[in-house]
Image (spheres, helix red, strand yellow):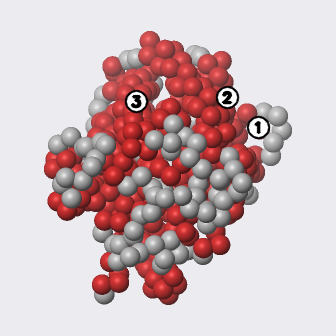
Amino acid sequence: MASLFRKKIVDLTPQANALARTLSWPHLVALGVGAIVGTGILTLIGVGAGLAGPSVILSFAIAGAICACAALAYAEMATMIPASGSAYTYSYVVIGELIAWVIGWSLILEYSLVVSTVAVGWSGYAAPLLTQYGFPVAFTAGPALGGVVNAPAVFIIGVVALLLSAGTKESATLNAVLVVVKIVALAVFVAVALPAFDAANLHPFMPYGFPKAPGADGVDRGVMAAAAIIFFAFYGFDAISTAAEETKNPGRDLAIGIVGSMVACVAIYILVAVTAVGALSYTRFAGSAEPLALILREIGSPKVAVFLGASAVIALPTVLLAFLFGQSRIFFTMARDGLLPQSLATVSKRGAPVRITLITAAIVAVLAGLLPLGEIAALANAGTLAAFVAVCACMLIMRRRAPDAPRTFRTPAAWFVGPAGILGCLYLFLSLPLRTELYFLAWNAFGLLVYFVYARRRAVATG
């Protein structure tokens, strides 16, 4: 039984299969903003409005507050344990191997499905542009939505995977440029749509109530039901923590990247959400694959809508890049620890894990090509919530176990922030659709089978 909770010994000395340290804090802030600002605000705001009505604004605020608690815990843990692997590594070092495996397995679910979700969201903006030039409609959606395969989603995953394989610094620099494009597009949306704000569009503000409750059609609705889905819109800062081993000065730069990107994105999201629900009745854009562009067309700005759509097509891949980056690093670290085949833990001459990046891309491309957006996002949230709970718990445990240990960043009011993050994440998990919760439990049951049959005997990172 004791072996189930053996702990990882982090070795920060240079290793033969180490990742190259090429990133500084501007790269990390751009990585975080690139990951956070994307599909959630560009596409899932329509899904959230359909579940909560105008009170989707409140859903964004609640999800953002919970994520802020988790972000503060991540910042402290990332500077204490500046090693690749994010929540998986923190759990391995602080709690033990079994919990680390569960969190790592949940992170595999999170990152894989996030990449798939974003690719489908990107396709939602790219498809109208492609079909205008004769691209077959049947190849712009998966079977669940009446198509054959979502070819644009598969294509963009392949492009981003090749970019990541070229090198971490090169892809991070391009990411920073594309992030600027995305922020400019959202600023233009606010500038054009805000003058159309009509307070009447906010009434009734909470048509489906606050807690999760099934509607007449059997779909769970309410402020918290929407928050549990659009929670997807806020995370992404955790991808920064996966870059710890590739950061030049992790003790300083990780905290700046995590907290800085989170603060900026909460402000952006609230402003865009208020503008969207005020400019047009939520019933007219709920469920749209391109809600912001639809709003612009409806208020008489079709050219700006084309600009926004084109900007999304150009800039949404920054989210793909950040999460595919994070996913490949989780796989890489678990493989280096022996919990996955160690042959996957190889790097190129540029210090990039090319083999695991391409394998990860192939897996998520299949998911993106065949599955619809809403179901993928909900299941991705379940994996993320598990990781956030673990990181908040690790921070509190280390405050007890090693209160005087060096901490470059200390979470303010830790004994409020940590429990608030844990309880908030658990409430969001319970607000997910029941089917999603069952899928998540089934995924982890399968993961435990893999652990006891294969991974447990091969672990090499413990002491």
Instruction: Name the residue carrying label 1.
Output: 130
The CA distance from mark 3 to mark 2 is 23 Å
Q: Specify the label residue 264 is tagged with.
A: 3
Residue type of the residue flagged with mark 2: Ala
What residue is shown at x 72% (from left), y 54% (from top)? 349
Q: Position of residue 130 (x, y in %)?
A: 76, 37
Quadrant holding the C terminus = bottom left
- Does 226 appear above or below 394? above
Residue lying furthest right in this view?
134
Mark 3 is surrounded, within 10 Å at the Cα level, by few (under 14), some (14 to 19) or many (20 or more) other residues, namely some
**Residue 268 appears in the figure:** yes
Q: Position of residue 124 (x, y in %)?
A: 63, 41
Left or right: where 245 falls relative to 152: left
Depth-wise, is mark 3 or mark 1 nearer the camera? 3
Q: Residue at x 18, y 54 (%)?
A: 403
| Comes first in the chain, label 2 or label 1 | 1
- Taking the spot 58% from the left edge, 58% from the top edge, the residue there is 18
Quadrant (top left, top right, bottom left, bottom right) of the N terminus: bottom left
Instruction: State left or right for residue 11 relative to residue 136.
Output: left
Q: Nearer the viewer, mark 3 or mark 2?
A: 3
Q: Amino acid at mark 1?
A: Leu
**Residue matched to label 2:** 310
223 vs 323, nearest the viewer? 323
Q: Nearer the viewer, mark 2 or mark 1?
A: 2
Distance from the alpha carbon under mark 3 to that under mark 1: 33 Å
* Residue 59 in view of the camera: no
Q: Earlier in the sequence, mark 3 or mark 2?
A: 3
Asked if the residue under mark 1 is in contact with the one under mark 3, i.e. CB atoms within 8 Å, the reply is no
